[in-house]
Image: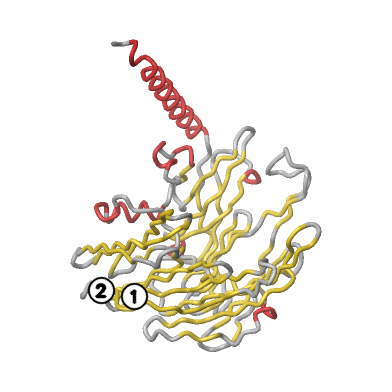
Amino acid sequence: MMKKYWKSVVVLSFIIIGLSSYLIHSALLASELPRFELEHKSGDESLVDSMSVAGVYIDDKYHNAFDFDGEDTNYRSDSTFFEDMIGGYDPVKERLIDEYRDFMRGAPYLYQNYYDGDDALVIVEEDWNHRYNQMETDLKVSYLNKETEEEQKFTIDLEDGNYANVIEVQYVDGEIFVFSDHANSNERVLMEYVYDVESKQLISEKEILKSEGSNENEVDYSQINKLYESVPYQPMESLIFRAEEVEMEEFEEGLREVGREEKLFQYELKTGEITELDLPVEDYGYADRYDGQYIYFEQPNDENTISIRPYDLEKEEFQEEIEIVQHKIENENELDQSQHVEQLRPTIYEVRDQLLYTLENNSLKVIDVESGETVYEGEISSNDGIDMENVRFDDMRFE
């Protein structure tokens, strides 16, 4: 009897040994890695309470990815095996699981596909299916009323052969708004689906924007996206969408972009009105972010600096420019000795509630966009005696 199952026993033993080795190695590695702290220099400390940064600590052997929320340092190697399987540490998802454990059970990866306000929590999951050599998508929506604890789950059935990518979810006066980008050949369509919670009915399904390339040679393309929000789940009164049509030409070395037309549109959630903004975007730089009041244009000045130009939508005027420095890494690449090239150590920035957060090297600043005043300053450091030149910050986010 034992001979019959010996192969299964051997395979299972290797799996157990491999998993045990992984856990032991992770635990030993995590115990040796430095922890960080945020030293307050000046200003209102509450402004950084919900902020966290992601980065990499580079030692002699490894690039060690971590998240730091101002108090705790969480390395990827600190994560459990199962957390690694689903993408590692996510502070927003962890908070939602702590607060709404039953509702969050089995929740998908969170990016632009959820809403979290004082009134409701809504999560939309794309359900992709391959049928007849086509990718089809249905949208599975989960809704939680935070006051009554009522839950609803429903599916938005899309047309056959329709591929959809959720780019925004909102909740306004008992109605769930789901915005998705649909691709069909070289045509892109922005759709809005509205579901009424009380009647439990899909009450509206309409096309908001369409962008298409004129591809005689089948090389032109179009795209529609939403201006980035640093807090993707927050309630918004209006949204900014970008429609682009890109002209490509075939050269000996391959395809090359030879022209681009870009337009910005403002969409009011309560009225359903969409308006093209009268902004010659090519004159102002790249429209990168939107916080509900300002559109933030990003314009390179030279190889070391970029200017952030906040545009007030209501007043229809620009605020004072904010310059961000991109620091050069001199000598033989202090971050990676295997690469002997000159690199930039970029300053990362985010926007929230008309405040601009910048992390330049290890120095954190919060700037009031309207006044231009610095309202918080702090510095990230470590008491473990490491060289902070071996720490690279890549991202900033808000819980």
Residue 201, which numbered label? 2
Residue 41: x and y in percent read 54, 59
Residue 49 at least partly seen: no
Residue 363: x and y in percent read 59, 57
Of 224 and 18, the residue lying toward us: 224
Residue 247, which numbered label? none
Q: Secondary structure at mark 2?
A: strand
Question: What amino acid is found at the position of numbered circle 1 in the picture?
Answer: Val
**Tag 1: Cα neighbours inside 10 Å, few (<14), some, or many (≥20)?**
many
Quadrant in which the N terminus is drawn: top left
Q: Which residue is mark 1?
A: 194
Residue 317: x and y in percent read 59, 87
Quadrant in which the C terminus is drawn: bottom left
Q: Is residue 226 above or below residue 140?
A: below
Mark found first going from the N terminus, 1 or 2: 1
**Tag 2: Cα neighbours inside 10 Å, few (<14), some, or many (≥20)?**
few
Of 256 and 391, the residue lying toward us: 256
CA separation in Å, label 1 and label 2: 9 Å
Residue 157 at least partly seen: yes
Question: What amino acid is found at the position of numbered circle 2 in the picture?
Answer: Gln
Residue at the image position 52 percent from the left and 74 percent from the top: 290
Q: Is residue 78 above or below residue 119?
A: above
Q: Secondary structure at mark 1?
A: strand
Of 75 and 381, the residue lying toward us: 75
Residue 240: x and y in percent read 51, 77
360 to the left or right of 231: right
- Tag 1–tag 2 contact (CB < 8 Å): no
Q: Is residue 127 above or below residue 258?
A: above
Of 296 and 187, the residue lying toward us: 187
